[in-house]
Image (cartoon, rainbow, N blue to C red):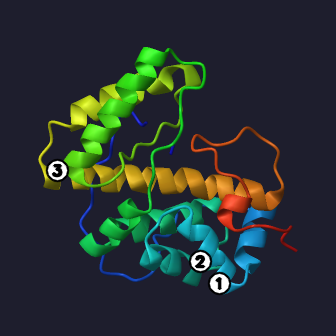
């Protein structure tokens, strides 16, 4: 789980099956991207399903390898997310779960968050999805709780549209995390605490 204060409007599905291409000079691919490009197709799809739970999204992003740079990979992920059908979105949302946040937070805040999440899931039928990138850990509970309460006022179709865009942002964050894992980078865990094993990467990729 990764919150952008401003949210880009959803675009209509694109007719082209190819990923969006990034304008401008192409930088050399990093180690993580080189390894991602060389993963066997099945391993690539498995890793991508941990970024977004739509099988078609994962298949499409995997099939368009090799990517010349990270920006092209992220653009392809965005393109595939914008083109998801309602069935793809339902599948991806069904695979999401609420991330554990707020270690050391006041007990009352955690209770309020659990109650809000449960109410949201009863209302909309899936986990609450939001991208919390850019917010320090001490702010995440308050941001999450405020967002759930705000979005509880939406109609189902409106909330699905917002959840779809948040899912796209979360997928971008997870793609970057995946490249870091493949590169063997040592940095703090992402917002949803996923590790290399979570991405199906149980051994170094050569």
Evaluate if marks 3 and 2 touch, with contact meaning CB atoms under 8 Å apart. no
Which element type, helix, strand or loop, lies under badge 3? helix
Q: Residue at x 78, y 71 (%)?
A: 35
Evaluate if marks 1 and 2 touch, with contact meaning CB atoms under 8 Å apart. yes
Q: Quadrant of residue 201?
A: bottom right
Badge 1 density bin: few <14, some 14–19, many ≥20, Cα 10 Å: few
Q: Quadrant of residue 196?
A: bottom right
Closer to the camera, 96 or 189? 96
Give the residue pinned by disc 3: 158
Is the residue 180 above or below the residue 95 in the image?
above
Q: Which quarter of the figure is the C terminus placed in? A: bottom right
Evaluate if marks 3 and 1 touch, with contact meaning CB atoms under 8 Å apart. no
Give the residue pinned by disc 2: 45
Which element type, helix, strand or loop, lies under badge 2? helix
Give the residue pinned by disc 1: 42
| x then y, percent, for residue 85 | 28, 74
Q: CA distance from mark 3 to mark 2?
A: 30 Å
Left or right of residue 93, residue 199 in this image = right
Is residue 197 visible from the viewing direction of this image? yes
């Amino acid at each position: 789980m990764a919150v952008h204060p401003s949210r880009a409007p959803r675009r209509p599905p694109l007719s082209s099956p190819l990923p969006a291409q990034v304008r401008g000079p192409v930088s050399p691919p990093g180690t993580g991207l080189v390894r991602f490009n060389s993963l066997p197709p099945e391993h690539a799809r498995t890793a991508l399903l941990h970024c977004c739970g739509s099988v078609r999204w994962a298949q499409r992003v995997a099939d368009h390898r090799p990517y010349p740079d990270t920006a092209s990979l992220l653009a392809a992920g965005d393109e595939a997310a914008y083109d998801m059908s309602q069935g793809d979105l339902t599948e991806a949302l069904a695979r999401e779960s609420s991330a554990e946040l707020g270690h050391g937070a006041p007990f009352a805040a955690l209770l309020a968050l659990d109650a809000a999440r449960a109410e949201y899931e009863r209302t909309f039928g899936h986990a609450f999805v939001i991208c919390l990138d850019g917010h320090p850990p001490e702010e995440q509970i308050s941001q999450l709780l405020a967002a759930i309460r705000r979005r509880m006022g939406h109609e189902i179709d409106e909330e699905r549209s917002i959840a779809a865009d948040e899912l796209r942002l979360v997928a971008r964050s997870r793609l970057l995390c995946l490249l870091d894992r493949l590169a063997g980078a040592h940095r703090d865990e992402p917002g949803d605490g996923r590790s290399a094993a979570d991405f199906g990467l149980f051994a170094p990729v050569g």
